[in-house]
Image (spheres, grey):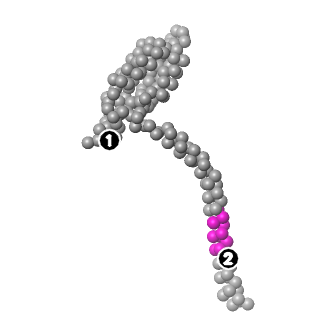
Amino acid sequence: MCVFVLFWYLPLRKKMKAVNQAKTAQTLAIAKGAADSRQLPLLKEQLLKLQNRIRNYKVNIPETNTFGGFLGSVIDLMNKYNLKEQEITPGEEVKADKFNCIPVNIHCKGELTQIFNLYRQFQILDRLIRIEQVKLSNDSNYNGHVSMETKAIIYYRAKVG
């Protein structure tokens, strides 16, 4: 009986335990794969949205520093929405490997809806703009006008050479 237990039952018991652990690991892997496969359509949809969003990024980042054109566009938008006390101040240009950028401070006054419309137009400009900071301050006499200060960055492609 001892020989049976030591040489046949215990080794088989260890092998059975190892097989059951492997079976459990495979079952978990299959369950994880099934759960991941259900996520795949959602990930594909997110990927398509991101691809559509960045498809024309090169078009939105000009090859040359066209700050004057950007400045004219912003001034035209401010005039379109009747914003007062317009001030646009460029900062010092920052050069990098692929993209150069120019920080810009924009200041104006107007009603909140006018400023909101200005930001909405910033989103659809043909130039990439990153808004870093927005400060809205109510006038001291509370007449419905808001003072807006924005720190933005505009980009253009660096010349590779």
Residue 12 sits in quarter: bottom right
Is residue 133 visible to us here? no
Report the front residue among 5 and 128: 128
Q: Secondary structure at mark 1?
A: loop
Is there CB contact under 8 Å for labels 2 and 1? no
Q: Which quadrant holds residue 2? A: bottom right
In terms of image quadrants, where is residue 46?
A: top right
Residue at the image position 44 percent from the left and 12 percent from the top: 84
On the picture, is 11 further left or further right than 95?
right
Counting from the top left corner in percent of width and height, residue 60 is at 41, 33
Up-down relation of residue 143 to residue 160 (above or below): above
Mark 1, Cα crowd under 10 Å, few <14 / some 14-19 / many 20+, is: few
x, y percent for residue 90: 34, 24
Residue name at image x 49 percent, y 42 percent: 51
* Left or right: where 47 falls relative to 96: right
Q: Is residue 2 above or below residue 58?
A: below
For disc 1, the marked residue is: 97
The magenta stretch is: 16-28
Q: Label 1 is placed on what type of residue?
A: Asp
47, 19: nearer the viewer = 47
Amino acid carrying label 2: it is: Met
- Label 2 and label 1: CA atoms lie apart by 60 Å
The label number, if any, that marks residue 16 in the structure image: 2
Q: Residues within 10 Å of mark 2 (few under 14, many from 20)?
A: few
Say whether residue 96 is magenta.
no
